[in-house]
Image (cartoon, rainbow, N blue to C red):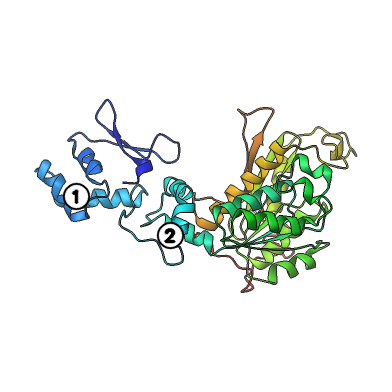
Amino acid sequence: MKPEHRAYRTVDGNVRIGSVIYGIGAEIEDADGWVWTLTEAMDGSRSAPQIAAEVTARHPGVPVDSVRSAMAELREAGFVDDAAAPLPAGLGARDRVRHARGVALLRWMDLSPRATPWKAQLRLRRARVLVLGVGGTGGATAQLLVASGVGHLHAVDPDVVELSNLNRQLLYREADIGRPKATAARAALQALNSDVTVTSECREVCGPDDLIALLTAARYDLLVLGADRPPEIRRWANRVCLRLGLPWVEGGYRGPLVTAGVHVPGEGPCWECQRAGEDERRDLRLRPGQSEDAASPRMPWNPASAVTASLSGTLVAHAALALLTGVPPMQPGFRYGVNLMSLGDPVLQRHPRRTDCPACGTSPSGVRGRANGRGRAKRNPSGG
């Protein structure tokens, strides 16, 4: 049994397994008590035949096939891994020390029948991520991905570090003021984890063609969009990633509202579907001819703090890690987040795919996702 999923007996004799966290835990009826014996025997010190022999010896009326079937069901439910499984080729003793706590969390959240949680860490080691915009959200995301052990991270940003950035962009220091963000980010990220390959370039994306050029210059498994300008950049990213078949995540902060979006071409609605659905859901009660900016005013710069920037980067990084490793399973095509003014009212926006979507719909104007052999990422990696 995974140590994080250690079972216990309830007052009525049932077996609870997988902790009490929603989405993981389960409860098994155990009138005869043999399931409890089984979970105790599966402590990593016995082989499957030894476990079956111990259970049937203590409960003679239980067929050995029932014990084997129960072990298989527990494995399929994600509560079991192989305590004797070796570290996968491609990871070493340094990884075992550095990422032990992170892999334990992957093991806790992973409900797939995987022999060892280190397979998920190996997927991360082999991943290549492009982070476009390493300011508040993008900088925090880049830090978290590098700390987690992503194999190759390429940071792109056209700006230089300014004093006004330092209230929220924790990737930088006062000594970086005046330096290109791409250069300072590369140095900071490489110092955080020398096992990761970090590259960067000072470059501005002025249109879809620029983004295509960036994403096809190398093979990437994921785009992280941390840039918020020009205003059309999310639409560009959506169209380009649909064309290349490339998963992407984006996020940001608007006052106390911090969100992240998760998008995978061909799996659920695209960013434009989501945006259209959310526009329809909201009732701004605008007068005829009145701009949406009247209800949500735009300012030359977005009010933000280290808290909102770091939170948005954390949400984006969580989604990125889930897409890259398959842990936890994540159905893309949604936006999630937190409203710091109302912590009991979390943000979760999920709208259906639209057949009339100009980007991914079935109409002739829809852009259909297609792999180009370089930008295509592997999806649903939890299967092995």
Q: Most extreme residue toward the top, as rendered?
A: 11
Of 101 and 316, nearer the camera is 101
Task: Specify the label residue 93 is tagged with.
Answer: 2
Location of the C terminus (image quadrant) = bottom left
User: Is 129 displayed left or right of 238 in the figure?
Assistant: left
> Looking at the image, is mark 2 or mark 1 earlier in the sequence?
1
Q: How many labels does the image show?
A: 2
Nearer to me, 26 or 169: 169
Foreground disc of the pair 2, 1:
2
Residue at image position (64%, 55%) is 191
Q: Position of 51 compared to 253: left or right?
A: left
Question: Where is residue 193 drawn, in percent x and y?
Answer: 59, 56
Q: Residue at x 44, y 62 (%)?
A: 92
From this viewpoint, is residue 294 visible? yes
Work out how far the residue at label 2 is from the one at label 1, CA to CA, in angstroms: 30 Å
**Within-10-Å neighbours for mark 2: few <14, some 14–19, many 20+:** few
Q: Which residue is under mark 1?
A: 51
Name the kind of residue labelled 2 in the image: Ala
**In this rendering, is residue 275 above or below 295?**
below
Residue 356 seen in the current view: no
Q: Which residue lies furthest to the right in this view?
A: 289
Point out residue 143 in the picture as x, y percentages from the top left corner: 64, 51
Q: Nearer the viewer, residue 29 or 135?
A: 135
- Disc 1 marks which amino acid? Ile
**In this image, 307 relative to 299: left or right?**
left
Q: Residue at x 58, y 52 (%)?
A: 147
Q: How crowded is mark 1: few (under 14 residues within 10 Å), some or many (20 or more)?
A: many
Above or below — where is 175 with respect to 360? above
Say left or right for 17 vs 59: right
